[in-house]
Amino acid sequence: MQYAPNSEIPGNARFHATADDRLFIVYYCGGSVNENRLLQILPEGDNKPVRLDLQEPFGTFFTAAERGGSAPSDIIDLFGSGRDSQVLRYARVRIR
């Protein structure tokens, strides 16, 4: 499938709360790119996503979040699949 130049299509996403009460969204972005990103939710809306430097992006993933019983944390645990949906992968990302 061909995408228009610079077309970015957000996909799978999860909320993540930190111990200091910040709120983020970690998400997959496809289209003309293939990457996971982290976006802080700010009241003034002046926020820019940050590309997560992963060996291979997660297309589908789960996180250890409050809704699943985990405490807010500056660490995001990602578990899911990338290019090969038959292979499960794990990554740990520290928010600074």
Image (cartoon, helix red, strand yellow):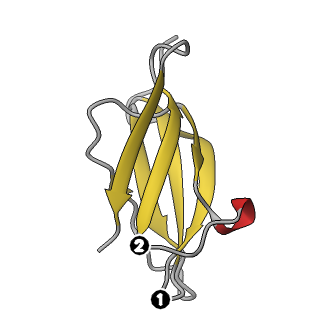
From the viewer's perspective, is residue 91 above or below residue 43? Answer: above
Q: Amino acid at mark 2?
A: Asp
Other residues around mark 1 within 10 Å, as few (<14) / some (14–19) / many (≥20): few
Q: Earlier in the sequence, mark 2 or mark 1?
A: 1
From the viewer's perspective, is residue 16 above or below residue 86? Answer: below
For this rendering, which residue is in front, 30 or 22?
22
In percent of width and height, residue 35 lies at 38, 38
In the picture, the disc for residue 74 is: 2
Toward which corner of the image does residue 54 lie, by quadrant? top left
Answer yes or no: do the residues labelled 2 and 1 have beta carbons within 8 Å? yes
Q: Secondary structure at mark 1?
A: loop
State whether residue 8 appears in this view. no
**61 sits left or right of 57 in the view:** right
Residue under numbered circle 1 = 20
Please report the residue visible at 41 percent of the width from the left and 72 percent of the height from the top. 74
Location of the C terminus (image quadrant)? bottom left
Please report the residue visible at 47 percent of the width from the left and 89 percent of the height from the top. 20
Q: Secondary structure at mark 2?
A: loop
**23 sits left or right of 54 in the view:** right
